[in-house]
Structure formats: structure tokens, C-alpha cells
């Protein structure tokens, strides 16, 4: 400092310290209406429409004939009462019929489709064997019946029927006797073996069979006033696109019947496998999507910031800041944070929260297993996933599953399959042989090793019985020749080979022709 400046400062004397403006109090934290408005994404979901489980849905246009009224267009006896008694809980969990359009949509999803396809495939995989009782030779009849079953594709038709019953709860099989329209279709043809069938079905009259989906069929006649009559809530005729067809010509398949009060609401069908599995499939789809969403965002990152001044007027700056953070949020990106240089410019702090993913596979697997439990299908059949763990095996579950399929065959397929075979006999032979029937082939089959062990055990048992005199070797030979699974099937029973020479069986002495003639004399 120069001499003049020091002199001026001495003359002026000490100067007072400059006044410092007091610090302004910080404004309280508030959230602007604009910020709240922009945070409302997505909007609230509307409440699901409640369904009436007893509501009778009309058929598609063209199913009923013109100027006709279905028997259930007005409330049936007991129907109004049932609607009044329906509780709100019945509207949920698939307690109301979904209708053919929605059931058709569900048939596109693999979770629903695999249930019906697996059951239909297993029920018709081994198919049937035509049998005959009695001592008469009926091989030609059995061969003719088998040829017609293959010609008409009955196995494939019954597989398709089982699938349709799983999709819609009802399926139909039309017996084609040469008429596809006209009043003759409204007349009965009997059960395939009675006098009515013999009068209606002549030799060569049967042309084949066809499946008809339930959506094209609507009940025409049924009893609603007297439960003691045979057609109580059981249609004796159906409308098929305006054409009235008797129930004996249009065989109806229903695997899971509903109570009488619900039959009109279900269009006189049964409970479909798709509707039974719907709550569990919905849970599976929601769990599957939630797991996928959680995996894609299991790590949540954020920035702590003082929002007192950010959200007071508008939130544009905040949302631009968030958008900038999201754009740079990557393993190869760089996030720039504000260190804070003033009282109104606070520093930012980064944080990260990660969700553990250790048990998601178990939760997702359990949701999928619930679908299998409703359908009664083993997990290895439904998903192809084999059990894991110590001594894990699915053999027992598959055996139990086959027991259920065999019960389904007897209950669901046998009645109408018997009618089909009777119609074939009536058309081929002019009569039905009561000694001819059929059996379903067993679904469980042994491998080559197990079959060899079984034959070895049976051979040891036969040897013990022969040695003790209980059986004769010829009886064992007959059993082996008649067993289709035996390697000796078709063996000539009478062509018994001579035993090999040995100590117990010395060779016969040689004789000339003269000694033989003298011995015979």
C-alpha cells in the first residue's frame, strides 16, 4: 500500500464492519397440484362387471328356426327363485358360465388347450379291442367291425369329441344315415340295438359319423314340470342351425354335468375344463407376468434431493431431471450429481435398493402346479418337467393318472361307443350280436426288461404247476399261443415237438418194414 493510501486511512479513522443480511428462513415443503396430477399414472382400473350365474344366454343367429321361441326364453320353474338366492360370491371364481365365444377364445391359450388335448390324447391313445364271447368263431365279424371303425375314423372322432367337451363342456356326434336335412332327422333311430334301430337302419344305411360343436346346437324339447319323466332337463331333440334333429341321431357327450338349476344357463351342457381351470390359470398368468416384471426391475435406483423448492410452482424441472437420470441409467452410462454450492441448492445423494430373486422360481412353479392339480394331470405330462430330488420318480403319479383316464373312458366314452358299434353291426350284418363287445386297451405298458422278467416269473410258475401235476404242458402251450403279448403268439398248439433224446428219454430202436408190419398185425 502506498504512503498516500495509508495516510488517508489514518485520517478517516476506523470504519464500522459491513452489515450482513440475515439468512432468510427456508420455505416449508409443499407439493404442487401439477406434480400430483402427473403422478397419477396409470389410472384406476374400473370395477369388474358382476355376472349372473343363472342367466340364460341366447344361441347364435341361425341355430333356432325362424319365428320360434326356445323353451327357456322365459324363466323356467325355479329359475327366478334361483336368481334371487344367488349370492355375490357366486359371481367370482368362474361360478358363472363363460359362454361359447369366450370359451372359444380360451381354447387358443396353451394353458387351457393342453389340458383338454392331453386328456383327449390319453383317453384314445391305445384305443379299443373288439372282443367276442362264446365258442363260435366270429373272427370275420370282428374284422369287419374293425375295418369300419377305421374307415369312419371313430378313434379320431372320439378324440375330437373329448377335446370339445374339455373346451365347451358339451360335444355332439352325428350318425349319418344318408339324410342331412328334412323332417326325417326329427325321428328317433333307437339305441342301436332295439327294434326301432332295426326298422330305421338297414344294411349299408350307415354312411359315417361327424362331430358337431356345441355352439351350433340348441335344445328343442325337454321336460321342466315333472322330475319323474325320463326327459327331465334332458333334451330329446336339438336344433342344429334351424334343423330339428332327434337326440338318438345327435349323440350328446357331457363329462361333467352341472345341477339342474344351472343346466339352462349352461345351454344344457356341462362344466368345461377351461372354466374349471380359469381361476388358477389367471393366477399363473399374473404370477408369470409379475415375476417377469420383477426381474426386469429388481434393482431400484434413486436420488435424494431437497424437494422444497422443486415442487412449489411446477414439476417440469423435476421430471426433466428424472428423465435425464433414466436416460443415463446404464452400466455404460454416467450419472452427474449436484454437489450443492448454495443454501438453496442442496446436494444430491444416490441410493440403490435391490430385491432378492432367490425364491421366485418356487412361487412360479407352485402357480403352474395348481393348474395341474385341477386337471388331475401329472406335472411331467403337462409341462414335460421331470421331478427332481433324492429318489424322485413320476411312475406312481402316472399310474394314478391312468386309473383316472380309464374311469373316464368307462363313464364318458363307453355308452356312446357301444351305440356306434351297434349301428355298425346293424348296417353290416342286419342285426346286433350280443356276444360282441369291446375293451379299452390298458394305458400302462412295460418296457422290454420288465416284460422279460414277467415272462421268466410266469415260466417258473408254470414249471412248478406242471411238476406238481396241477397243469398239463399242453394247457400252458395253449395259453402262450393265445397271448398276443407273448413271443409265441399264434403257435400251432397241436404241433407238439418230440422231446430230445436223453437218459430219461432213450431213442426208439430201429426197426425194418417187415417187423413193423408184423407188429401192426
Image: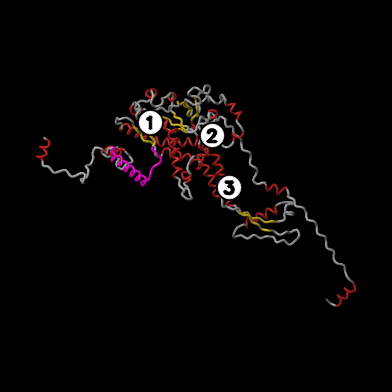
Tell me if I can see residue 427 in this picture: no
C-alpha separation, residue under disc 1 versus residue under disc 2: 33 Å
Q: Which residue is mark 1?
A: 421
Locate the N terminus and report the quarter of the image it occupies.
bottom right
Residue 201: x and y, percent? 37, 25
| Lower position in the chain sequence, tag 2 or tag 3 | 2
C-alpha separation, residue under disc 3 versus residue under disc 1: 52 Å
Residue 304: name its quadrant: bottom right
Q: Main secondary structure of the magenta part?
A: helix
Q: Which residues are magenta?
A: 441-469
Is mark 1 in CB contact (under 8 Å) with mark 2? no
Residue 36: x and y, percent? 70, 48
The one of 395 and 38 positioned closer to us in this rendering: 395
Residue in view at x 52 percent, y 44 percent = 369
C-alpha separation, residue under disc 2 versus residue under disc 3: 29 Å
Badge 3 density bin: few <14, some 14–19, many ≥20, Cα 10 Å: some
- Say if the magenta span includes residue 458: yes
Q: Secondary structure at mark 3?
A: helix
Residue 410: name its quadrant: top left
Residue 444: x and y, percent? 40, 41
Q: Which residue is mark 3?
A: 290
Residue 441: name its quadrant: top left
Left or right of residue 292: residue 304: right
The correct choice, above or below, for 243 with respect to 349 in the image is above
Q: Mark number for residue 99?
A: 2
Left or right of residue 335: residue 172: left
Amino acid at each position: 500500500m502506498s504512503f498516500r493510501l495509508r495516510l488517508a486511512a489514518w485520517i478517516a479513522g476506523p470504519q464500522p464492519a459491513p452489515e450482513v443480511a440475515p439468512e432468510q428462513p427456508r420455505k416449508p415443503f409443499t407439493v404442487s397440484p401439477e406434480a400430483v396430477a402427473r403422478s397419477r399414472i396409470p389410472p384406476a382400473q374400473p370395477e369388474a362387471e358382476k355376472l349372473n350365474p343363472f342367466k340364460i344366454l341366447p344361441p347364435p343367429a341361425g341355430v333356432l328356426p325362424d319365428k320360434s321361441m326356445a323353451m327357456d326364453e322365459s324363466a323356467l320353474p325355479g329359475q327366478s327363485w334361483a336368481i334371487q338366492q344367488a349370492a355375490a360370491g357366486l359371481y367370482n371364481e368362474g361360478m358363472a358360465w363363460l359362454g361359447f365365444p369366450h370359451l372359444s377364445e380360451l381354447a387358443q391359450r396353451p394353458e387351457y388347450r393342453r389340458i383338454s388335448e392331453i386328456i383327449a390324447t390319453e383317453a384314445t391313445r391305445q384305443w379299443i379291442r373288439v372282443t367276442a364271447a362264446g365258442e363260435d368263431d366270429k373272427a370275420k365279424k370282428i374284422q369287419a367291425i374293425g375295418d369300419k371303425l377305421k374307415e369312419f375314423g371313430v378313434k379320431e372322432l372320439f378324440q375330437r369329441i373329448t377335446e370339445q367337451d374339455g373346451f365347451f363342456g358339451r360335444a355332439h356326434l352325428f350318425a349319418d344315415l344318408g339324410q342331412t336335412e328334412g323332417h326325417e332327422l326329427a325321428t328317433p333311430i333307437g339305441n342301436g340295438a332295439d327294434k326301432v334301430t332295426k326298422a330305421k337302419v338297414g344294411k349299408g344305411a350307415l354312411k359315417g359319423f361327424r362331430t358337431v360343436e356345441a355352439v351350433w346346437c340348441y335344445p328343442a324339447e325337454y321336460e321342466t314340470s315333472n322330475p319323474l319323466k325320463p326327459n327331465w332337463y334332458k333334451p330329446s331333440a336339438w336344433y342344429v342351425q334351424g334343423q330339428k334333429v332327434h337326440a338318438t341321431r345327435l349323440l350328446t357327450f357331457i363329462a361333467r354335468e352341472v345341477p339342474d338349476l344351472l343346466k339352462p344357463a349352461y345351454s344344457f351342457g356341462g362344466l368345461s375344463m377351461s372354466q374349471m381351470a380359469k381361476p388358477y390359470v389367471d393366477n399363473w398368468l399374473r404370477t408369470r407376468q409379475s415375476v417377469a416384471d420383477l426381474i426386469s426391475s429388481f434393482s431400484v435406483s434413486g436420488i435424494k434431493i431437497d424437494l422444497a423448492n422443486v415442487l412449489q410452482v411446477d414439476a417440469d424441472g423435476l421430471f426433466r431431471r428424472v428423465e435425464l437420470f433414466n436416460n443415463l441409467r446404464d452400466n455404460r452410462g454416467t450419472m452427474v450429481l449436484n454437489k450443492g454450492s448454495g443454501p438453496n441448492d442442496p446436494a444430491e445423494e444416490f441410493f440403490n435398493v435391490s430385491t432378492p430373486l432367490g425364491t421366485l422360481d418356487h412361487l412360479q412353479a407352485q402357480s403352474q402346479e395348481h393348474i395341474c392339480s385341477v386337471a388331475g394331470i401329472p406335472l411331467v405330462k403337462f409341462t414335460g418337467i421331470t421331478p427332481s430330488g433324492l429318489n424322485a420318480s413320476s411312475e406312481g403319479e402316472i399310474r394314478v393318472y391312468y386309473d383316472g383316464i380309464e374311469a373316464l373312458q368307462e363313464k364318458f366314452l363307453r355308452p356312446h361307443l357301444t351305440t356306434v358299434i351297434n349301428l355298425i353291426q346293424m348296417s353290416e350284418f342286419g342285426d346286433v350280436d350280443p356276444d360282441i363287445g369291446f375293451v379299452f386297451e390298458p394305458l400302462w405298458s412295460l418296457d422290454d426288461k420288465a416284460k422279460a422278467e414277467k415272462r421268466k416269473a410266469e415260466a417258473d410258475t408254470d414249471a412248478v404247476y406242471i411238476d406238481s401235476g396241477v397243469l398239463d404242458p399242453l394247457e400252458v402251450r395253449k395259453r402262450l399261443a393265445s397271448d398276443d403279448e407273448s413271443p409265441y403268439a399264434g403257435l400251432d398248439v397241436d404241433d407238439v415237438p418230440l422231446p430230445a433224446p436223453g437218459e430219461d428219454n432213450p431213442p426208439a430202436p430201429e426197426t425194418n418194414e417187415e417187423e413193423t408190419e408184423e407188429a401192426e398185425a
